[in-house]
Amino acid sequence: MLKLVLTVGIFVLTGENFVRGQRGEFYYIKPCHKHDPNVNKCLQKAANYLLAHLRRGIPELNLTPPEPITIDEIGLALGSGPDGYRATFRDIKAYGISNLTITAVRSDIPTCQFQLSFAVPKISARAQFESSGILILVPASGGGDYWGEYGGARAKVYVKCVPVQKHGRTYLKLEQMKFDFSVKDIKMGVENVHNSNSIIQAALNLFINTNAHDIVKEMKPDLIKKLLMLISNFVQGLFDNIPYDQWIIGDDYN
């Protein structure tokens, strides 16, 4: 029995290595032809193909499975004046983002511009928070644990890049990126609140869920800024390691 298990294991491993060898060094990329009349559909399929590998990690790029995605800090401000409510969320850990699906791609290959639309079924987030000020006529200074459940998230990413020469081959350099998102369903709240009691905590959670979309709207600029940094660094890392001719075939740069 042990011999059979070892034989099957060796077969699986060598089979996987053979498939990777057949696909080449960049087995996680499906290139698209510049002159394909359905190039945007090809790019959409290629992006989802790459995402499937990213979820498992790509050792050749030193990429491990991405979750949880961590954001260091996001601020929130509601109201003005000395009693305005202020909250800081730290060590934010998000789960579910890697389950995104690219739903559409628009491209202008000659100018190296791309817009990707994607959907994420569900995102869960956990964080530590500290707050100060007055909220619903109640002193809300303290801290505790934050949780959030977000359903039906949609986003768009615009990318503009330029070709650069490196080691005798053409690579891409990220020149500009824009990002925006929306969320359909939001549930969130706080627990284990310091310097509080169950009545105040219940009042805070009632306010948070009643005004969930407005709260996310206030957090959005800071969140977009942080996500842009993460996405930009990630995309540039891909561009640094994957030559242009692995993305696009039939271009003058190849």
Image: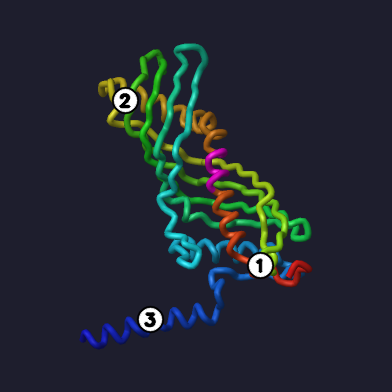
Q: At 52% across and 46% down in the image, what residue appears?
A: 153
State yes or no: discs 2 and 1 in contact (Cβ < 8 Å).
no
Residue 169: give x, y in percent of width and height: 69, 68
Q: CA distance from mark 3 to mark 1?
A: 35 Å
Q: Disc 3 marks which amino acid?
A: Val
| Res. 17 in view | yes
In the rendered image, the residue lying farthest to the front is: 167
The local crowd at label 2, few if under 14, some if 14 to 19, many if 20 or more residues have their Cα within 10 Å, is some
Report the residue marked by disc 3.
12
Q: Say whether residue 117 is left or right of residue 207.
A: right
Query: Which of these two is toward me, 94 or 154?
Result: 94
Task: From the image, tell me which residue sits under label 1.
Answer: 167
Image coordinates for residue 27, horizontal then vertical, percent:
54, 73
Q: Amino acid at mark 2?
A: Ala
Q: Earlier in the sequence, mark 2 or mark 1?
A: 1
- Highlighted magenta segment, given as a residue range: 224-230
Q: Position of residue 135 (x, y in %)?
A: 41, 18
